[in-house]
Amino acid sequence: MTFVSGALGQAGPGGSALTSILPGLTADGPPNPWFSWTYVVNHLDELALAGKEHVILTVVSVLAAVAIAFPLALMARRWRRLQGPLLSFTGALYTIPALALIAALWPVFGLSLKTVAVALTMYALLIVLRNLIEGLDGVDNDVRDAARGMGYGSTRMLFRVELPLALPTVMAGIRVATVSTIGLVTIGSIVGHGGFGDLILGGFRSNFYHAEIMTGVVACVVLAVTAELILVGLQRLLTPWTWRGARR
Amino acid sequence: MGGTWQWLTDPANWHGPDGIPTRLVQHLVISGLALALACIVALPLGIWLGHRGRGGFLAINVGNAGRAIPTFGVLIIFASWKPVGVGDLAAILALALFAIPPILTNTYVGLREVDADIKDAARGMGMTGAQQLRRVELPLARPLLFAGLATSTVQTVATATLAALVAGGGLGRYIVDGFALQDYSMLYGGTVLVAALCIALERGLRALQRRLDPTARGVHVHLMPGAVEATEVGHVTTR
């Protein structure tokens, strides 16, 4: 009937509260530890596949959001009156729960990666767009004047002056979008494409297999932290002036 | 499209234990209890840390940490953990955990940002620490406090949809059941209801926020370095 019908009606392994927390202390039922290195070692292939899917979904969704947000931000800058409606439209998209969005896209794209990627792009869009607009707005007008005085046209000014100056704000947005997306990918497991989320839902359906669930959650957190560190590193590489001076 | 409209307007869907009013009430009760739990933890802690001016690292980074942990994963952990089990309680606990960061961060920053001169003046007038907190710091921190609550509220009500995944109630049931039964009308009907609820709530809270504090732009005001990034979680209610 429902997603959980497989898991419901079957008692979970492990006896009392104590035995569920502390692996090995099984009063009744087979042991069902939350953390199991044996599980990880025995399922490396599955983990690698899930990780690959998780990374692909995240990268595609965030890049797609950046690709869509960039022209939108330029439009919002050119026609100020568009800014309000654009932000409230993407804001409304952001407000719709991920489960609802993925489920609603499922009849359109089926049980595919596309369903998840499209939904996640919609989420990342608001965060990236807002920070793009804010970053470009934050560029000092005196700097623009100086660039214009040096003979910069509007395109060259955008790419050589405004975007580099907006980069810290833009990158902050991309970081938040990436980390949020990594978390939301897990919900894609309802259509069978949730990266590490497939382990979480899979463990839940296999009679509350704790090790599988926890491995999925921990892998997800590790991925999010790794992505954050990579993006912080990238940001430092791209904007050396923002930190080199500060360190001295 | 026609099917969705028919489902939404079918009187049969508007009463009984599977009816829209019942599901809506379940949804709001789950969200409300989660928010109440989060407030019990986050408000005193935020007020205490903000008043003392300590623990800023914790108060600000808890939001960033929270974002890295998948809500769905925590929900499933609670539901698979025997003392909690499947059902509404797992959802309430998971939602409460994720409602804490916005409230904590905004409360801390709100209290922390009260001008030191104002606090000095209050002390000069002979106010005790508690008086200072109640009559000076808390009123001045109110806009940010409210912004944090609003962010958590919208986020919680939106995420409460997941309760249905662990056999809980709420509007998410239509989505999960519609999906499982391949009943597109129910699926889209549920999606429309959830989306409408969340968007209406977000708009309503934002309007209320503006009325309470016409000058503030919400959590996204640039306060201290670090706070800006942390409160970015609050963007749902900022514009």
Image (cartoon, rainbow, N blue to C red):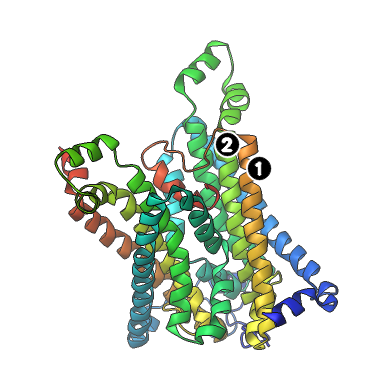
Give the structural element (helix, strand or loop) at label 2. Answer: helix
Q: Residue furthest top?
A: B125
**Residue drawn 31% across and 55% down?**
A171
Q: Is residue B232 above or below residue A98?
A: above
**Residue drawn 27% across and 51% down?**
A167
Q: Amino acid at mark 2?
A: Pro
Q: With A151 as the anchor, is B129 left or right in this view?
A: right
Nearer to us: label 2 or label 1: 1
Q: Quadrant of residue A222?
A: bottom left
Q: With A218 as the anchor, is B162 left or right in this view?
A: right
Q: Quadrant of residue A14?
A: bottom right
Q: Do the dots labelled 2 and 1 sit on one chain?
A: yes
The residue wearing badge 2 is B143
Q: Nearer the viewer, residue B169 or A16?
A: B169
For disc 2, the chain is B
Q: How many marks?
A: 2
- Between the residue at mark 2 and the residue at mark 1, the CA separation in whole angstroms equals 11 Å
Q: With B220 as the anchor, is A16 left or right in this view?
A: right
Marking on residue B41:
none
Q: Is residue A157 above or below residue B141?
A: below
**Residue drawn 55% across and 81% down?**
A204
Tell which circle, 2 or 1, labels the residue nearer the N-terminal end. Answer: 2
Q: Residues within 10 Å of mark 2 (few under 14, many from 20)?
A: many
Marking on residue B208:
1
For disc 1, the chain is B
Confirm whether residue A83 shows in the render. yes
